[in-house]
Image (spheres, rainbow, N blue to C red):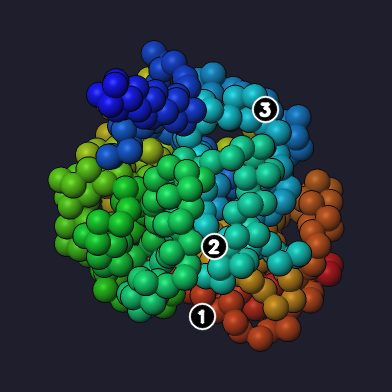
Amino acid sequence: MKKLVLLALAIALIMVGCTNRQKTQQFKENPDMEYRTLGSTGLRVGVIGLGCGGFDEIDSTASRELVTYALDHGMNYMDLYDANPKVRSNIGYGLGDRRAEMIIQGHIGCWWNGDSYERTRDVEKCKIGFEDLLERLHTDYIDVGMIHIVDKMEEWQEIQGSPYLQYVQDLKAQGKIKHIGLSSHNAEVALAIAKSGLVEVIMFSLNPAFDRVQSGKNPWDSKTFEEMLPGIDPVRVELYDYCAQHDIAITVMKTFGGGDRLLDAEKSPLKIALTRDQCFAYVMAKPCVKVALCSIDSASKVDEYLHYLKATDEEKDYNTALSKQASQNEIDKGSCTYCNHCMPCSAGIPIAKVNELLDKAEKDGLTAELKAKYDSLPHHAGECTHCGACLSRCPFGVDIPTQMDRAKEVFGK
């Protein structure tokens, strides 16, 4: 009898495991999508994934169309760092009854202060932010719970053994997150974290320009980006090799340099224009890379990004393009990539959005649509107090107060 009870218990545990796996991933692979296994998680993911950047520009109907079209075409991985209630609600509505088909990489440590996003390690704020994420996505779990942005070694040391890290680990023990990941822009920090054995997924900024910036410097210091190396930074090489050897998945942010910088010769630190297909091919050449994330704001644009999957070898050839690179050795500084790492603003200004609208207005002219979008922002550039707090947090050396002054002139407030 005792053996029968133990056998029944074992079968029950197996069934629970199967149920959890089914709950985590329910989809049929699309023959037109390329899939990779997300490291040791075992999850199968389409190589092109959705960022959350476009969801603050659209309504719930467009969100449903976008998510549905993306899932139907094999894009089954999404990063959601933004604490903006509108973004989260849009994505929740967009998923509808297809939540189990989308693998969500959700960040722990994103707080909405009522006006803007901010990064936090305060456990109570983290709890409120995470529960809000679950509620707005109409779910009771997140596939990959991300320790949100660790860019300094001191910060990584402070996190170890902290209540914040314990909270993340408690979420995993409770099944509210299935796997632990982390996001970083600093190769040295990312490598140390990979070697800690804590994470299965690392979200990392990876592209042909950033790979040639020397590691080991403060990523919030603009001098980090002053000189490009003749080849890939050796710390980055070690990071990519270590992750590949130890089955740690890298999901890529800044695939196009942030704000599509690498697609524009004038904005690109490489001083040449690459294509999306070339940027995708560059990151996908690394075995540790499983997903390249990109912000898309409409279903109609999905096909533009998915062109990579049917691109010819010639269209994907980034080596020839890079070999023709202009002979200069200074990476571009002062260009906003709309990454929001400057936040929070003491005046509540959504700095990245102001800079994005300003760039569009200066490039294509001030249209009524751009003016309306600017006017709808909760706070405007003219409210900038020039306190300078944002300057120490910007990884690209953007002169933000000056940008705010320019935006005030262009938009009138």
Residue 363 image offset from top left, x and y in percent = 64, 53
Q: Nearer the viewer, residue 177 or 402?
A: 177
The reply, left or right, for residue 227 in relation to residue 115 is left
Mark 2 is on which residue type?
Gly
Residue 23 image offset from top left, x and y in percent = 49, 28
Q: Earlier in the sequence, mark 2 or mark 1?
A: 2
- The answer to the question of whether label 3 and label 1 lie on touching residues, with beta carbons closer than 8 A, is no
Residue drawn at the location 79% of the way across and 74% of the way down: 382
Q: CA distance from mark 2 to mark 3?
A: 25 Å
- The quarter of the picture where residue 165 lies is bottom left
Quadrant (top left/top right/bottom left/bottom right) for the C terminus: bottom right
Q: CA distance from mark 2 to mark 1?
A: 20 Å
- The answer to the question of whether label 2 and label 1 lie on touching residues, with beta carbons closer than 8 A, is no
Residue drawn at the location 33% of the way across and 38% of the way down: 41
What residue is disc 2 on? Answer: 109
Label 3 SS: helix
Mark 1 is on which residue type?
Ser
The reply, left or right, for residue 281 in relation to residue 55 is left
What residue is disc 3 on? Answer: 96
What residue is disc 1 on? Answer: 392
Query: For the residues carrying marks 2 and 1, which lies nearer the camera in this image?
Result: 2
